[in-house]
Every structure is written in C-alpha cells, then in structure tokens.
Amino acid sequence: METPTLDFSATYRLESSPGVAYRVIEHPVEFDYTYELVCTDEECNHEEGWCYIVEESYDINYDMVYVRMVGDDYRHLVDVSELSVISEDDYCGGCGQIGCGW
C-alpha cells in the first residue's frame, strides 16, 4: 500500500465542514499486544510481569486523519479524501472561519 502524502504544515477545508479551516495533527494508530507465557514454574500463578514476553505491533490508518479546527483544541477524525488545501489568506487565523474579514 502506498502512503498518501499530506502536508502537515498546510491548512485544509473539509467537505463536511466547508466554512472552517483545519490543520492536520496525525494519522490514527491501532496497537495490538501479544503475550507469550515464558514462566516454567508450575506452582506460579503467572500474575507477575516477568512471566510473559509482550510483543507490541501497530497499524497506521493512512485513510483517516485527526484534524483540529483553527482556533480550537478539539480533535476530529476524518477521511483524508475530505481534505482540500486552502491558502493562508482564505481564513481567519483567530476564529478559523473561511472568509472571515477580521
């Protein structure tokens, strides 16, 4: 799978929220943990951390991305296909509205 290229320094408009400017934060990551029992003591209750080897794996979902509205701190999860780059002149840096004349 080829990784799509996103400009994390750019500002974007969303199809589902066309009046507001957003900035990309990161792609969502799913973690998976596998536990392998390595303790050979038959009287052990295996509640200790040394009884296991933990392997961590993860998958990055390049089809989705977390964005934050300019002027806000709430993260939104959106599909990458919704993003369109906009110019710095297209939105208000204070409130994040596209077309604001402030």
Image: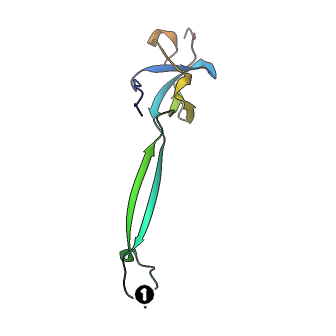
Q: Is residue 102 left or right of residue 27?
A: right
Q: Position of residue 36 (x, y in %)?
A: 41, 70
Q: Position of residue 49 (x, y in %)?
A: 39, 74
Circle 1: residue type: Cys
Residue 52, compared with residue 86, is above or below; it is below
Q: From the image, which quarter does the C terminus lie in? A: top right
Figure quadrant of residue 51: bottom left
Residue at horizontal 45 percent and vertical 33 percent from the top: 25
Secondary structure of residue under mark 1: loop
Identity of the residue furthest to the right in this view? 16
Residue at mark 1: 44
Identity of the residue furthest to the front in this view? 1
Residue at horizontal 52 percent and vertical 30 percent from the top: 68
Residue 60, compared with residue 34, is above or below; it is above
Q: In the rendered picture of this protein, how many numbered marks are placed on residues?
A: 1
Q: Position of residue 33 (x, y in %)?
A: 45, 60
Residue at horizontal 50 percent and vertical 33 percent from the top: 63
Identity of the residue furthest to the bottom in this view? 43
